[in-house]
Amino acid sequence: MAITSLTRNSIQNPNKYTDLLAGNSVYEVSSLVPIATITATGSQSDLTFNNIPQGYQDLLMVGSLRTTYAGATSGLNITAYYSGYPSTVQSVTRLFGDGAGAGSNRYTTQDAQIIGDIPAATSTAGLYGSLVWHMLNYSNSTTYKTTLSRVACDRNGAGTTFLTAGLGRYTGAITTINLSTFSGSFYYAAGSTVTLYGVKAVGQ
Amino acid sequence: MSMFPIASYTVGAGGSYGVDLSSISQAYTHLQVRIFARSAGSIADHVRVSPLNDQTPTNYRCHYLYGNGTSALSGSNQTTAGQIGFLTSGIPYSTSQSNTFATYIVDILDYTNTSKYKTVKAIGGWDDNNVSGTNANVSLSSYVWMNTAAITSVTIASVNNPMVQGTRIDLYGITSSGITGA
């Protein structure tokens, strides 16, 4: 009888084989694995990933974000941490351009990494900023945590793009990531989303 | 995008300049090099990604934009002997904040295509809470390798001094889709 259809769910141990032939083939699974997605309700001043699994090598976060702050833009602040981590140990070096010029600045000894701006309440409806955030070696317990992020906030006549390197001066493995507005009076707008991915190492 | 690990190298206790990766699978469309690095030396250093089948310095050109916490700066260079390849914009060294490593993500597009010169882009950098002042920076760079040969092996190594234990270099292959057209 010919095989006319085959679904992944019908295969035992689908991650093991690339083909159905008896032999030594190994099934390759992408090393970029989604962990969780948060969709803002419109009443959250923080978006938080808790209990991040420690089985990956690196983390990647991708977001589409806007706040309800009563202005054109508001700052995007990210803290990756673990229970009992020290305070005021975050810092960033930023490169940015706003269409008129380019610049660079630095924030030191902060509680969060201030990585860029995203659209807020008075920006045209439907405009959301984009975020791509990397942390390599997030579960390593001997090195400080370096982050690399890009934030894009183009508002059709205004806007800024950011490239930021950040440092968390602690060695603990990261179990929580918090995106904060640093305010209880405004929130991430409904429709904002952020997804966390794990990046597998060779051999995982 | 599907991304698959090809090779990984971690610097051990004795330190190391880096690694030669040979016989790179030609089954992918793009390559991504992920670098987490710190130099053991006392001077500024860089990591280079060099296709081993071309050691001609003038075949590599770079344009870059970087920020050092004070100014945004831009430049261009052509590699020289001893610094051949795609150079990152800098990694921490001995007088930088301890335990701090730079992160770079280097994308080599269409690395198997024998009709194209190779275009490479990189983002990366490091921050150390202003311990190193303007030596800490974040950058975006573009490179061209004026050679149409497929990339089959690369050296990923520091330029001036060995890198410290904890430095990690990973090579990933990125596939394209078999679906064509609308």
Image (cartoon, coloured by chain):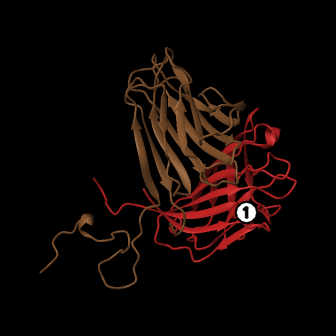
Chain colours: A brown, B red
Tell me if I can see residue B54 in this picture: no
Q: Is residue B83 left or right of residue B22?
A: right
Relative height, residue B84 to residue A105 (above, below) = below
Q: Which of the two residues, A145 or A1, is positioned nearer the viewer here? A: A145
Instruction: Name the subunit of mark 1.
Output: B
User: What's the residue at 75%, 55% (across, down)?
Assistant: B38
Between A200 and A123, the one nearer to me in the picture: A200
**Residue name at image x 60 percent, y 56 percent:** B106
Q: Crowdedness of circle 1 by 10 Å Cα count: few (<14), some, many (20+)?
A: some
- Quarter location, residue A81: top right
Quarter-of-image position of residue B149 = bottom right
Vertical relation: B136 (above or below) B17: above
What is the quadrant of the N terminus of chain B in the image? bottom left
Number of marks in the rendered image: 1
Dot 1 falls on a residue whose secondary structure is helix
Q: Residue at x 41, y 76 (%)?
A: A26
Residue at the limit of the structure toward the top, as seen here: A70
Q: Where is residue A47 in the image (x, y as percent from the top left)?
A: 47, 33
Residue positioned most to the front:
A84
User: Would residue B91 appear left or right of A20 to someone viewing this image?
Assistant: right
Q: Position of residue B22 (x, y in %)?
A: 61, 76
Q: Is A155 positioned to the left or the right of B95 in the image?
A: left
Q: Can residue B117 be seen in this view?
A: yes
The residue positioned farthest toward the right in the image shown: B42
Q: Which amino acid does label 1 sit on?
A: Thr
Residue A57: x and y, percent? Answer: 56, 57
Q: Mark 1 points at which residue?
A: B58
Q: Quadrant of residue A85?
A: top right
Q: Give how far across and how far down residue B161 sits, in percent.
A: 83, 62
Tell me: residue B122, above or below residue A12: above
